[in-house]
Amino acid sequence: MDTIVLKFGGSSLSDNINLNIVAKKIIELKEEGNRIICVVSAQGKTTDNLIKEAKELSAIPNEREMDALLSTGEQMSASKLAILLTMLGHKAISLTGWQAGIYTNSDYQSSKIINIDVTRINEELNKGRIVIVTGFQGIDEKQNITTLGRGGSDTTAVAIAAAVKAAHCYIFSDVDGVYTADPRDVKLAHKLNSISYEEMSYISGEGAKVLHDRCVELAEKYNMPIIAASTFNKNKGTEIANSMEETLIKSIIKNDNILITKIEGIENPYELLKKLTKNKIKIGKYNYENKILNFTINKVNRAKVEKILDKEKGNTTIKSVTKISIVGSGVSNHMEILEIVLKAIEEIKDKIIDIDVSACKISILFDSIIETKYLNDLHDSLLKEKYI
């Protein structure tokens, strides 16, 4: 009898209708002879709403209290699903992250899992129960509730799968796999049957919302196959493992959640960078020249950065920009790809402020938000030349 881990995202759990769809999928897999551990996110926009309400009270809420607040969303999902499965005649139990033995460090809002004591999970599985675990959260050495950062339920699922030595880890959402581009933006985007851990890590790291980037790192470390599939159909998903598709380019990602910060007249950028790092703010592209500092951050960190910069001398501007990334193992060995890319975006060449070419990706940073049209043009050009 295999143990499998299933993770369901917020859109899959958004209301009672969808909860019934999720319950049916769980029951089908259980009746195939599997022992089931299910990791759940908060329902729908619950986490966004909790953040919004907290920020109405404080522009930068206390991080410990935010973790305590945000953890409630997953608890609601887990208990509702357990109630439903029990009503349908299947023994089920919900466990919070700490009840499931998930221990983390104390980096509130972005904690790392240190260890998972799977004793309680195995006890419940041995009783024939479906075990439903709240994703995204754990407990630190002082018994404080911690969270793993947005998208962290994926990481919870993979970590538990590795700890119990599961056969597979399924990540279910409203999309049935990993695509060559966001199918909502690019009509000709198509689904990949498989992709390597390395390529998936780059795709997640560049802003694609398919999987949490840390979960892919964990999966590779423990050689845990992930299957990304849809809650709402039975289509074959995408397997993330030690495998490769024949096409060179795996995905093109347009990321509009980036801010470029410019500070003119700064004397000591090193001290500022230390402050940003201390506040767990991830810095992207960085450049310092002639007392002008430029760096990129994720939009979610804007309030934190502005608070830090209030104490800095110099003129500061922050604006939204776009980054387009072309991801594929060995892409830098084919310079003709860069030629095709540059031709496809020639109309907006004056907006380019940086091009970064590495072993697995080509990234282009623009000085403003660019239209989705150029993502389509780029995808079509590479598809026509059979690089996708």
Image (cartoon, helix red, strand yellow):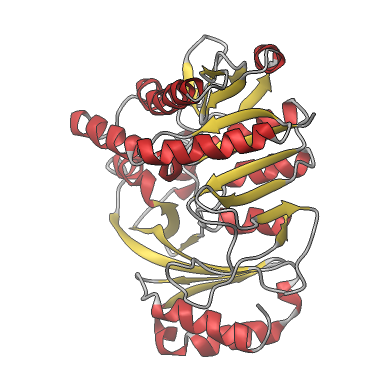
Left or right: where 149 falls relative to 131 = left
Q: Quadrant of residue 64?
A: top left
Q: Residue at x 41, y 89 (%)?
A: 347
What is the x, y in percent for residue 101?
62, 15
Q: Residue furthest left?
A: 56
What is the x, y in percent for residue 359?
72, 67
Q: Quadrant of residue 76?
A: top left
Screen quadrant of the C terminus: bottom right
Screen quadrant of the N terminus: top right
Q: Nearer the viewer, residue 285 or 151?
A: 151
Q: Nearer the viewer, residue 82 or 238?
A: 82
Q: Residue at x 29, y 55 (%)?
A: 316
Q: Residue at x 45, y 25 (%)?
A: 84
Taking 244 as reference, is 146 above or below it?
A: above
Q: Nearer the viewer, residue 85 or 126?
A: 85
Q: Report whether residue 134 is seen.
A: yes
Q: Quadrant of residue 334?
A: bottom right
Q: Residue furthest top?
A: 142
